[in-house]
Image (cartoon, rainbow, N blue to C red):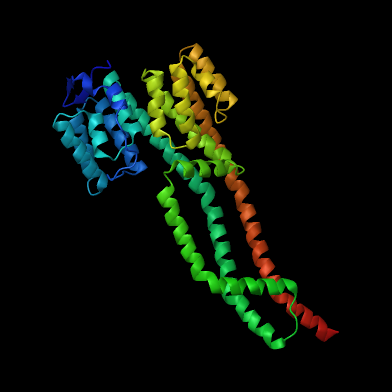
Amino acid sequence: MAGLNISHHQGKTEKRPSSFSLVSLLNQDIKLFSSGKILKDKQKESFYLELNTLLSAGMDLRAALDLIEEEFKGNAASEVIAQIKARVVSGAGFSESLAQSKSFTPYEYYSVKIGEETGKLTVVLHELSRYYTQKIKQKRQMVSALSYPVLILCTSLGAVSFMLYFIVPMFSEVFARFGGELPYLTRQIIAASVWLENYFLLLIAIAIVIVIGIVSVKHMLWYQKLTTSIIRRIPLIGKLYTHLHLARFCTAMALLTGAKIPLLNAITLTEKMISFYPIQVSLKGIKADITQGKHLHESLAAYAIYDPRLLALIKVGEEVNALDTFFAKLSEQYQENVEHQTALLSTFLEPVVIILLGMMVGFILVAMYLPMFELSSGITG
């Protein structure tokens, strides 16, 4: 099996040289970020789902790609699929064509290669469509949970900035005409308004520099380590972020072990797909441990990112030789946790942000009206 590439196209089964085997491809350098056209998650979900349906119905790969290309006509996905079809027609394997298009991740085209070599291409395509369905669902849950709090936060910052930049200077001019010493709280708000007016453009420039800096270093190891460490310490968000990536790790391992890929190769492929720093680092050490004869659950136990429940289920999976089943079960459990924590995060953030907005606006208003209250009290006295 390792020496064959079974490409299901044009209704035929084609044997390719052993030099194109999975093991040889694993030794090649892989570029995770390329200049090719990147398809959206929704487009990939539709692509894998429809391709699986057409191939399962008995259609050959070329005809299936023709139909899908026609459906995506008018956008970038159509061009990508046309390039893939042209390579398949010229004799290249489907997984090789995906890799050369530079629009798919190593996880995708290696998974497809596994499907070609094991004769389970439709199964792999189904799992890839499920993977993107879950990914889109998780993204929507995150957007749903954070959109309202973020909108309120941005509104509050805009309202406070507007008051400090426009409203407070108007009060300041009025207070200057009356003379006398202003209350401490009012003086601090006026000072903040003057500072914002003087350094407003500088703050914008600093924000732009920070954004450009983050974009330029976001793929560097030290930055990933730093940001991951900070995010994981944030209440609620840290746990949600960790479970989200553990779900993806378990999904990948379920697919690869289910295709009867050797465990070491499965971990190698998963490492190239996962961008979460703690899991990436752990997989490097786990590969070394397995090479030395350790069990998977023993290697996982050396890293705090993997919780006791995961370790216990993986241990049972190794004992009964059903790792794919237990990884799939863990993936479902982590996804359910993500859904629950997302709803909890939304419920928690909304009132907190609204309260903070009210406190900030109220604080500024009290500071501005305090001199008037004192003046009114003086006149009454």
Residue at position x 52%, y 19% from top? 297
In this picture, residue 211 sits left or right of residue 174: left
In this rendered view, identify the residue nearer to me: 247 or 56. 247
Residue at x 54%, y 60% (from the top left corner) = 154
When asked about the image quadrant of residue 109, the answer is top left
Q: Residue 152: image x %, image y %? A: 56, 58
Q: Position of residue 342 (x, y in %)?
A: 55, 42
Q: Residue at x 82, y 83 (%)?
A: 378
* Residue ranking furthest to the top: 320
When asked about the image quadrant of residue 22, the answer is top left
Location of residue 6 with respect to 189 vertically, above or below: above
Q: Nearer the viewer, residue 220 or 120?
A: 220
**Looking at the rendering, in which quadrant would you find the C terminus?**
bottom right
Q: Which residue reaches farthest bottom?
A: 177
Q: Position of residue 243 (x, y in %)?
A: 53, 35
Please report the residue visible at 19 percent of the width from the left and 40 percent of the height from the top. Answer: 82
Residue 325 can be seen, yes or no: no
Give the side of residue 292 with respect to residue 120, left or right: right
Instruction: Decide if residue 78 is in sight here.
Output: yes
Q: Position of residue 14 (x, y in %)?
A: 17, 21
**Which quadrant of the figure has residue 208?**
bottom left
